[in-house]
C-alpha cells in the first residue's frame, strides 16, 4: 500500500502544471494539470462579462488527432480541445444562474522558461434562468469570445 501511494505521489509531482489568468470577455483564473503529454485538466474560476461569477472544468486533449503544430525554434506550440461542465451566477440587480456543458479550444506557446501564452475559447451551452420564474436553454456562452491566457508553469 505504501509503495502504491509513493508511486502515485511521484507521478502527480512529475506532471506539468500551470496557473494564471485569462483576459477576454471577463477575467478568469485557471489551473491546468497535465496527465502525460497528451491530456490535461483545466479548472477555471471566471467573472463573465464582469457581471457575475462562475466556474468551468474541462478535460482537454493536447495536439488531438496526432496533429502537432510544426515548429523548430525555442519553445513549443500546442493546440488543444476539450469538454466539461460549467455553472455560475450573473447579474447584480436581477441575479440569474446557469449550468451546462462547457467546451474548450485553444492554442498555446510554451516558452523555454516556465511561462506560457494562450488564446482560448470556452463556450457554454446549457440551462439558464431569465427573470424570476423563467428557465430556458441558454446559448449566450457561445458568444463569449476569445481570451488571452498568461500562465506560470511549474
Image (tube, rainbow, N blue to C red):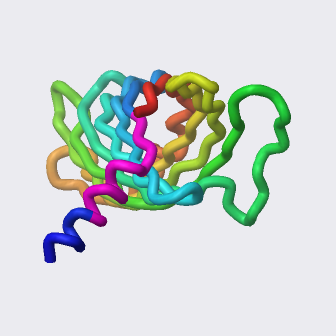
Q: Is residue 19 above or below residue 67?
A: above
Q: Does the magenta portion include 16?
A: yes
Nearer to me, 29 or 7:
7
Residue in view at x 29 percent, y 37 percent = 45
Q: Quadrant of the N terminus?
A: bottom left
Among all residues in the image, which is located at the extreme front? 3
107 displayed left or right of 143: right
Nearer to me, 111 or 141:
111
Q: Does the magenta portion include 84?
A: no
- Asked if residue 48 shows in the view, the reply is no
Q: Write the start and end of the magenta stretch as one range.
A: 7-18
- The location of residue 95, given as percent across then percent down, is 17, 36
Residue in view at x 34 percent, y 30 percent = 29
Q: Is residue 107 above or below residue 12?
A: above
82 displayed left or right of 84: right
- The location of residue 104, given as percent across then percent down, is 52, 50
- The location of residue 30, given as percent across then percent down, is 37, 35
- Asked if residue 84 shows in the view, the reply is yes
61 displayed left or right of 137: right
Residue in view at x 84 percent, y 34 percent = 72
Nearer to me, 108 or 121:
108
Q: Quadrant of the C terminus?
A: top left
Count the marks: how many?
0
Q: Is the magenta region chiefly helix, strand or loop?
A: helix
Residue in view at x 24 percent, y 34 percent = 53
Q: Quadrant of residue 49?
A: top left
Q: Quadrant of residue 21?
A: top left
Amino acid at each position: 500500500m505504501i509503495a502504491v501511494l509513493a508511486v502515485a505521489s511521484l507521478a502527480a509531482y512529475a506532471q506539468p502544471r500551470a496557473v494564471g489568468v485569462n483576459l477576454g470577455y471577463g477575467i478568469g483564473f485557471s489551473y491546468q494539470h497535465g496527465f502525460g503529454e497528451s491530456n490535461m485538466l483545466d479548472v477555471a474560476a471566471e467573472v463573465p462579462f464582469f457581471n457575475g461569477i462562475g466556474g468551468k472544468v474541462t478535460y482537454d486533449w493536447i495536439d488531438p488527432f496526432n496533429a502537432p503544430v510544426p515548429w523548430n525554434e525555442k519553445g513549443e506550440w500546442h493546440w488543444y480541445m476539450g469538454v466539461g461542465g460549467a455553472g455560475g451566477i450573473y447579474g447584480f440587480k436581477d441575479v440569474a444562474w446557469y449550468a451546462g456543458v462547457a467546451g474548450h479550444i485553444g492554442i498555446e506557446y510554451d516558452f523555454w522558461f516556465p511561462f506560457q501564452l494562450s488564446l482560448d475559447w470556452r463556450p457554454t451551452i446549457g440551462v439558464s434562468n431569465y427573470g424570476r420564474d423563467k428557465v430556458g436553454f441558454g446559448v449566450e456562452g457561445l458568444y463569449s469570445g476569445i481570451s488571452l491566457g498568461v500562465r506560470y508553469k511549474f
